[in-house]
Image: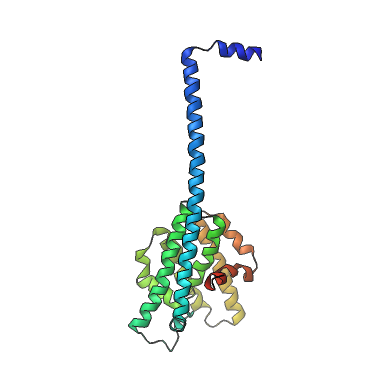
């Protein structure tokens, strides 16, 4: 202890000035990081609330136009489908609203302003829209050019892969088609996890199938 006191007493005025300046810098950095963490927490809460509110608007739209949207959400184009500008416009609004939310979600995750667990629940929704023949067709024809590279990188290869899967399993039985769909789903989650550098997404694959779809169903029914 005496040696330490002797060392301090032997410091020059310049050394003391340097110590004081460094201590001030450390305290300022600590204060800045503390405020940044507070701001990030607030931003996460705001993003979560925004996504929840806007997703509820999508589900209200879906409920209001349920009869119209039914054939657009089918896995393959129904034989009864007849092009109709008004009905097609409703379908476009439905899927574009979802893509707008997906863009917000991916941007927020890229900035680390949405929790990984929350983002994982959105990836379930990402995969669900690919099941729609209309979404896949319109993604290629029009949607893709209007969104960020993250969203493009997520959907472009996955839309093409899903169409290929349907062609390859067209003559398969129900069990084989179900197995192919599950393989696609796992590849999709792995693809999004790699694209977004978010390994937490993969944990959703370890849950039972019923549980992994529960978040999506809850959103649809406003739970």
Percent x, y of residue 162:
49, 72
- Residue 112 can be seen, yes or no: no
Percent x, y of residue 149:
40, 59
Q: Is residue 208 left or right of residue 100?
A: right
Q: Residue at x 50, y 60 (%)?
A: 192
Q: Is 172 located above or below residue 107 in the figure?
A: below
Q: Is 72 located above or below residue 10 in the figure?
A: below
Q: Quadrant of the N terminus?
A: top right
- Residue 127 can be seen, yes or no: yes
Q: Quadrant of the C terminus?
A: bottom right
Residue farthest along the left direction in this orientation:
85
Q: Nearer the viewer, residue 51 or 85?
A: 51
Q: Nearer the viewer, residue 107 or 151?
A: 107
Q: Residue at x 61, y 13 (%)?
A: 5
Percent x, y of residue 115:
54, 55
Q: Is residue 42 left or right of residue 211?
A: left
Q: Nearer the viewer, residue 123 or 64?
A: 64
Q: Is 176 located above or below residue 190 in the figure?
A: below
Q: Residue at x 55, y 56 (%)?
A: 116
Q: Is 183 located above or below residue 79 in the figure?
A: above
Percent x, y of residue 191:
51, 61
Residue farthest along the bottom direction in this orientation:
80
Q: Residue at x 38, y 63 (%)?
A: 147
């Amino acid at each position: 202890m005496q040696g330490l006191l002797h060392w301090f007493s032997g410091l020059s005025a310049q050394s003391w000035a340097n110590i004081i300046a460094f201590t001030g810098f450390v305290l300022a950095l600590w204060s800045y990081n503390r405020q940044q963490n507070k701001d990030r927490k607030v931003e996460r809460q705001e993003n979560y609330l925004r996504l929840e509110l806007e997703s509820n608007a999508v589900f209200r739209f879906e409920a209001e136009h349920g009869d119209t949207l039914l054939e657009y959400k089918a896995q393959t184009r129904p034989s009864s489908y007849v092009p109709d500008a008004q009905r097609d416009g409703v379908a476009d609004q439905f899927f574009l609203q979802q893509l707008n939310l997906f863009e917000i979600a991916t941007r927020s995750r890229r900035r680390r302003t949405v929790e990984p667990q929350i983002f994982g629940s959105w990836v379930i929704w990402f995969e669900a829209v690919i099941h729609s023949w209309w979404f896949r067709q319109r993604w290629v024809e029009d949607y893709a050019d209007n969104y960020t590279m993250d969203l493009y990188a997520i959907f472009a290869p996955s839309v093409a892969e899903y169409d290929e899967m349907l062609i390859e399993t067209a003559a398969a039985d129900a069990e084989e088609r179900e197995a192919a769909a599950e393989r696609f789903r796992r590849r999709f989650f792995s693809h999004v996890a790699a694209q977004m550098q978010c390994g937490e997404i993969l944990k959703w694959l370890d849950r039972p199938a019923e549980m992994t779809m529960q978040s999506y169903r809850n959103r649809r029914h406003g739970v």
